[in-house]
Image (cartoon, coloured by chain):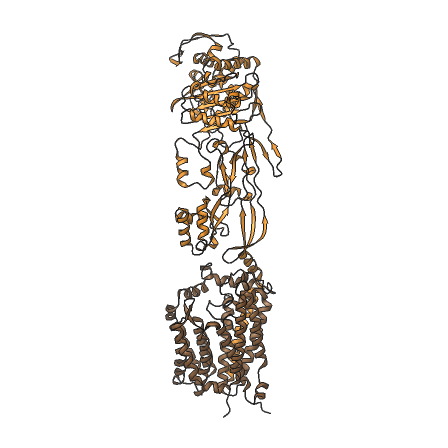
Chain colours: A orange, B brown
Amino acid sequence: MEFQQPSRRLFILNLIIGMLVGILVVRLWQVQVLQGASYLRQSEENRIRDYTLTAPRGIIYDRKGRPLVRNRPAFTVAVLPLELRNSTPVIQRLASILTISPQEITARIDRNRPRLFEPVRIKRDAGSHVVAMIEENRLDLPGVIILPEPVRDYVHGKMAAHVLGYLGEIDPTELAARQVEGYKPGDLIGKAGVERAYETVLRGTDGRLRMEVDALGRPLRVLSRAPAIPGRAIVLTLDLDVQKAAYDALQASGMQAGAAIAMDPRTGDILAMASIPSYDPNLFAISISPQVWQAITTDRSKPLLNRAIAATYEPGSVFKLVTATAALDHGIVSRRTMFDAPGYFQLGQWTFGDLRAWGRIDFLTGFANSVNVVFYTLGYRLGGEELAKYAFLMGLGELTGVDLPGEINGTIPSPSTKEQLVGEPWFPGDSVNMSIGQGAVTVTPIQVARMLGGIATGGPLLQPRVVLMTYDRTRSAHPSEPYVQRSVPYQDSTLALLREGMRAVVERGSGYGARVEGLPMAGKTGSAENPRGKPHAWFAGYAPVAEPRIVVVAFVEHGFRGGISAAPVARAMLRAVFPRPADVQVPR
Amino acid sequence: MSRRLLRYLDWPVLAATCILVAGGAVVLYSAVQNSGDAGALVRARVLHAIFGLVVLALAAFIDYQTIARAWRPILGTTLFLLLAVLIVGRSSMGAQRWIPLGPLGGFQPSELAKLALIITLAKHMDGHKELTSWRDILPVLAQAAVPIALVVRQPDLGTSMVLTAIVAVMLFAGGAPLRAMGAMGAGAAAVAPMAWRILHDYQRRRLLVFIDPGADPLGAGYALIQSKIAVGSGQVFGKGLLHGTQNLLHFIPEQHTDFVFTVIGEELGFIGAALMLALFVVWLWRGMSIAAQAKDRLGMLMAVGVVGMIAFHLFINVGMTLGLMPITGIPLPFISHGGSALVAMMGATGLLLNVGMRRKKIRF
């Protein structure tokens, strides 16, 4: 019997096989020809990793070229979210190595969610034993990487913290505003001081290392390299010696809070600007832990506050410079004008007190000894409007324009503004109070410094500055020019008398404590009564008298007597600026 | 006698087989080029290919009716080895599939099972000229069920699917009523949920990510996504032999075994992949015409079994790398790394040529 082929069934099988192969061909066409370009891109993304080469920030020097802020090589532990396969045990393990909680790591990764290719920094400035431990456990920690990232090193810690500022991770709102400048989540940005004001100068341009990696993310070879461009260096106007003297003297005052400024009145150069209590910017240089941040920001003594520019205080007797200038200009007083100083000033039913009774004295004696009754009398005659006018004219109550962030105005009250703001009329007693810098008058120490500069140099108000010059990429220096904002129209006779009075303050009056042997200087003390406790202590002065090169302002919160607690701070700064031969340390 | 045999030898099938094996060895070299023991792997491949040619010749020249008559020892040996592998087998990927053979590497009895099933089913169905009643069909199923069950026990999902496909294709070609085929299909569908329970976790995940590859892009869905990227990125002309980045940088797991097609797609592009498919089309088309011209039902069934097996392998394997099929461990015939599979496939080719050489006389 001849075998009969079931040809119909074989035909169907043939058809099925043909169809299946057809499906494969169509699919191949679809994947390779139609979508090929997209898959090619994906395969490139697969094999290429861009590593950011962190650009070191610019170094900050003092005016004599001594580094105040520099960069220290360090390692950052980071995580590549895309390569974090099987994340739970890896995060657990990493957390135990870094001794932080796994939740903190997860939270950091989640914040970076939309950018899976970017490393998420977990810990900056990881210690060498941590780095060694991670390298040893490399195989158990896929997706964990070590990045070489320099860490900011504030060489002198707390000493110049408020001028230098600190860094912090860019926050979301800042990031949204500055993304076009190339900021990425987790980048460090200046948060205060010079670090913030000169962010664009100090910040370099990050480089990029393009690497080919295998499926486990292990780098195989370098495809291209765009080197990091370091940030530009800055030379500050600060003089490390004066700064140190200012900070140490403030600390030595034994008081909680205060500020000290040394400024060259001819250029506006800030040679020293110290504020206590201070903080250590190095704590912020690595990602600050929430606990430390909490402790610093909620500290009632406000260590982050730069009291030299961002806090206002009653000027007290320092304001008598304004009262005296107004009275001299108006001719209602001269050096020989005699006053009766019985220890109080009677205005109707109100009595304004003084420290002691002086009897009958001339104006210069009254000025040198800061006799309140003398100024009560003058202020009463001048009136509030005139006092306010002269205060503004001499540079109080307005921003000095110092190149640091956070400066505030203060208040100079006047009859018109009091009506507007408080809704109460200006009483004659307000003028009396204002004449000695009490009442609603508040100023910042830097305003006082600028005012003193005007008196010292005969009128010009220089914009205070902390940056002397910046370097550009080719390492050539760009000095910043001193800027005369305006000139106070002092009458020569007024200036002469003011200066004579201020000399007397230091030589035989309330400012004796600021005196430096052999240095002719002028100054004014102040004890500003305030509702919060003992009076604030002020000393403002300049030296040398004939050819002023330096203005010093020392302020101590609740320091009681300017001559006692503030004057020594000023003296310390002056000693640093004008060292006597005996003060110079000769290396043996 | 042997002259007549050689005259009827199907040269296109033999040529396609040799080109696939030789070309496959080159692709395989590319897949393992930076694995450290690339040389050893290629030497093993050449050794296996030579051994495969010997098996092919034996399977071609010993009359297939003689082979079929020896179905009992063949099936017996296979079952014995399948049992043995469960006891002494070497484990890989959570399954016991290997019998260590010292210098020859390992031997996978499940590959032998494919051939044994084709031979015994053909022999058995040849005895039942009509498969019209369940009384004829059930013994066939019972006979197939034993090796399938043993393979499932390893567990080797891929091979058990191949064996099932062989049974289905041979039953269909053997003339089983469509109603019976439908009933068996429905039965298989009913048993499928039970099969879910015996699967390993990784196998379940593979099936789940096939439905939604994005669900776990770095875990189980990884291979699926990366293999598509590899094939797609080859575009029309490929990245050049030995230059596939997905291949070189090990983005594809198992790139020299089940995913070897990604190397072809990536490095040789659409042109290379289509050329490979064309070789398989020649092979399958000639295979079906050998089946159609077989001189008896036994030969026809053997040929259909072999062709069905190769076609199933091809579609499932390539379909898997293209995201058409879930990931199952089914090798690409003649190309994937694995000596047992290569020898079995070449033996199957020999069997096909055997049927072809002994086709009915052409009438004058």
How many marks the image carries: the answer is 0
Q: Is residue A287 visible?
A: yes
Image coordinates of residue B238 in percent, x first then y, are 59, 64
Q: Residue B272, relative to residue A67: is it above or below?
A: below
Q: Position of residue A209 (x, y in %)?
A: 56, 50
Q: Is residue A58 above or below residue B309?
A: above
Q: Is residue B293 rendered to the left or right of residue A313?
A: right
Residue B183 in view: no
* Furthest residue in direction bottom, as rendered: A1
Q: Is residue B72 above or below residue A582?
A: below
How far across and down, in percent of the image, does residue B110 sit?
44, 75
Quarter occupied by residue A44: bottom right
Q: Position of residue B344 (x, y in %)?
A: 49, 77
Return the residue nearer the eye: B32 or A182. Answer: B32
Where A420 falls versus B124 (above or below)? above
Front residue of B319 and A409: B319
